[in-house]
Image (cartoon, rainbow, N blue to C red):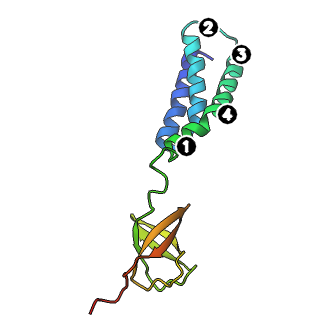
């Protein structure tokens, strides 16, 4: 394949990953390998087609195995300070929530499953604090002095 063909394929794959497809950073490494093969051809390294494909395959696989997990963690929340940013947020219980019980709560414009990890029931309308987040499930506990009853 001509060197410019490799560059076109590589940039297309990078663009697809960044703009449209969430392929978990696999296309980044495949696209980068295609660009590397294209650049070698552009700078005068002439290889038969089978050698280009072999080099492309080795570069794509090696870079994915060696670097993908590190890059993915760094860019998708593995960096310090970005983990569990929901901890400490306040939600409102839509109904009485027994200890260990589940309900749906709204937080930051999304609906989440919330589990009462406290030893006491969270009354309807009471505010609760997020103490942990596991995937799309929030672990909540009641706030001291929070209830749905107005002060008399």
Q: Which-is-in-front pick, marks 2 and 1?
A: 1
- 10 Å crowding of disc 1: few (<14), some (14-19), many (20+): few
Q: Quadrant of residue 115?
A: bottom right
Q: Earlier in the sequence, mark 3 or mark 4?
A: 3
Circle 2 residue: 45
Q: Position of residue 6 (x, y in %)?
A: 58, 21
- Residue 132 visible in the current orientation: yes
Q: Which-is-in-front pick, marks 4 and 2?
A: 4
Label 3 to label 1, Cα distance in Å?
33 Å
Q: Position of residue 128 (x, y in %)?
A: 42, 75
* Residue at image coords 60%, 18%: 37
Label 4 to label 1, Cα distance in Å?
14 Å
**Callout 2: SS:** loop
* Residue at image coords 36%, 82%: 145
Along the line of sight, the residue nearer the viewer: 4 or 35: 35
Q: Earlier in the sequence, mark 4 or mark 1?
A: 4
* Residue at image coords 55%, 81%: 99
State if disc 2 and disc 4 touch (CB < 8 Å). no
Circle 3 residue: 51
In the image, is residue 83 above or below residue 19? below
Q: Earlier in the sequence, mark 3 or mark 2?
A: 2
Q: Position of residue 26 (x, y in %)?
A: 60, 38
């Amino acid at each position: 394949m001509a060197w410019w063909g490799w560059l076109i394929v590589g940039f297309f794959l990078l663009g697809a990953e960044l703009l449209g497809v969430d392929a978990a950073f696999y296309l980044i490494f495949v696209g980068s390998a295609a660009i590397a093969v294209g650049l070698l051809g552009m700078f005068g390294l002439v290889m038969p087609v089978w050698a280009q494909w072999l080099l492309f395959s080795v570069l794509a696989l090696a870079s994915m195995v060696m670097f993908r997990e590190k890059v993915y963690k760094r860019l998708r929340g593995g960096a310090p300070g970005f983990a569990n940013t929901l901890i400490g947020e306040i939600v409102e219980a839509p109904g009485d929530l027994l200890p260990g019980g589940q309900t749906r709560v709204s937080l930051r414009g999304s609906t989440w499953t919330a589990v009462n990890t406290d030893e006491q029931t969270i009354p309807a309308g009471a505010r609760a604090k997020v103490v942990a987040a596991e995937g799309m499930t929030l672990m909540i506990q009641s706030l001291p002095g929070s209830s749905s009853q107005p002060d008399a």
